[in-house]
Image: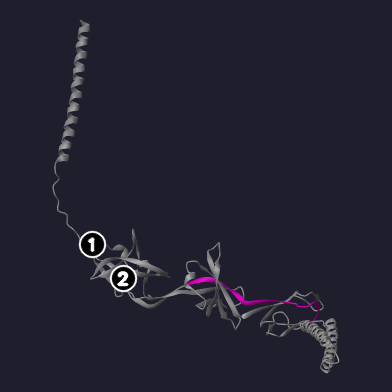
Amino acid sequence: MTAKVSRTKVDAAGRHGARRIVVKIVIVAVAIITLFVLAQMPSPKQDVAVTEAPPVNVTVLPVSAEPQFPDAFDLPAVIEPNQIVTIAAEVAGRVEWIGPREGSQVKAGAPLMRLNTDLLQAEFESMQAQAKNDQTEFDRQQGLVKGGAAPSRELDQAGTQLAISLARLQEVQARLERTRIPAPVAGTLNDLLVKEGEYMQAGTPVARIVQTDVVKVAVHVPEQDVAFFSAGHAATILADIKGRQQSFSGTITFISKIADERTRSTRMEITLVNPDGLLHSGKIVRARLTRQILQNAILIPLLAVIPMENGYAVYVEEASKAQRREVKLGIIKGDRIQVLSGLQPGDKLIVSGHRFVAPGQDVNVVSNVSEGK
């Protein structure tokens, strides 16, 4: 009896739990269905007020063309002497006298030094006496031949001997003259390589003269620019002289036919006068070279250009609206760039505020700027 009662209670509890689970499932299903129905219902339409974007404040620059614009660029360059002449002794001898000192300015032909002439002088006098004697013998044989007292063969031999003596005399005389060493060119006696009393062999370097009243400016030009230049082309040299920049006019006198294999640049020499000696050898200067003169060139501020996915664009102001123009660009000059197409003189280029506008957007011109400001 007791077991039967217990089993009845258990069955009742199981049925009660099952009903609670069913109730929960039903509530969840009803909630899901309700949410699905609400999601499918159209939302009520709302009227949204459309507001126009306010005008953008911009600054414009009237576009103009320069009648002639030099396409120029600067390159570092080095001053070199126009000539460096090393003088060598042409005959052997002992240095007997040296005239000018190192650093002196010398003229072409001015005596620099003299070698001892004792031995050469004696040889010269001997050859001079021999030539005189041979001349006398030749004259005598010539008289005998004319009188028929001697054969012409004797006159020929005397003539040959005289010619040999005269040639030797001229050779000794030339060697004697070369004991006096002059300056072959005008310039600065930069180095004396021997001293008084020193004995030298023929070919020994004795002095070095540097010519700086005319100087060369050596500059290496990139390979893509070399074709723009030729000998006779004008160039400007900019140099810092005692803290102040000075310019000098020169002329291109040499363009190498061989480019530097490492830098792919070509050596060019610009020659200019240097009468005051302001440009000394080794000085670093700038060479301003002009590739070409551009006609009617349009240049605009570089910051006015907007990079696009496929090129470049600018904005101009037309009837208080911003209009985009695609442009083709050329050379860059400082903070300006050349426009090859896309702009015309008279256009009002937006140079400030252009990055905040879109095509057709209203703009408010707050200021105009002129070229160069």
Question: What range is drawn magenta here?
Answer: 73-97
Local packing at callout 2 (Cα closer than 10 Å; few below 14, some 14-19, many 20+) is many
Q: Does residue 243 show up?
A: no
Disc 1 target residue: 53
Give whichever of 160, 261 is nearer the camera.
160
Q: Which of the 4 image quadrants contains residue 358? A: bottom left
Residue 289: image x %, image y %?
49, 74
Residue drawn where x is 18% and y is 18% of the image: 15
Residue 192: image x %, image y %?
73, 77
Q: Which mark is residue 343?
A: 2
- Is 49 included in the stretch rendered in magenta? no
Q: Does residue 141 show up?
A: yes
Measured Cα–Cα span from mark 1 to mark 2: 27 Å
Which is the main secondary structure of the residues drawn in magenta? strand
Residue drawn where x is 18% and y is 24% of the image: 22
Q: Which mark is residue 101?
A: none
Give whichever of 141, 231 is nearer the camera.
141
- Identity of the residue furthest to the front in this view: 148
SS at mark 2?
loop
Residue 182: image x %, image y %?
72, 83
- Is 84 included in the stretch rendered in magenta? yes
Indicate which disc, 1 or 2, sits on the residue closer to the N terminus: 1
Residue drawn where x is 26% and y is 67% of the image: 322
Give whichever of 210, 201 is nearer the camera.
201
For residue 231, side relative to residue 130 (left or right): left
Q: Which of the 4 image quadrants contains residue 172? A: bottom right
User: Of the residues shown, which amino acid type is indicated by label 1?
Assistant: Ala
Give whichever of 77, 52 is nearer the camera.
77
The N terminus: image quadrant: top left
| Count of number-bearing discs | 2
Residue 282: image x %, image y %?
61, 73
Residue drawn where x is 15% and y is 40% of the image: 40
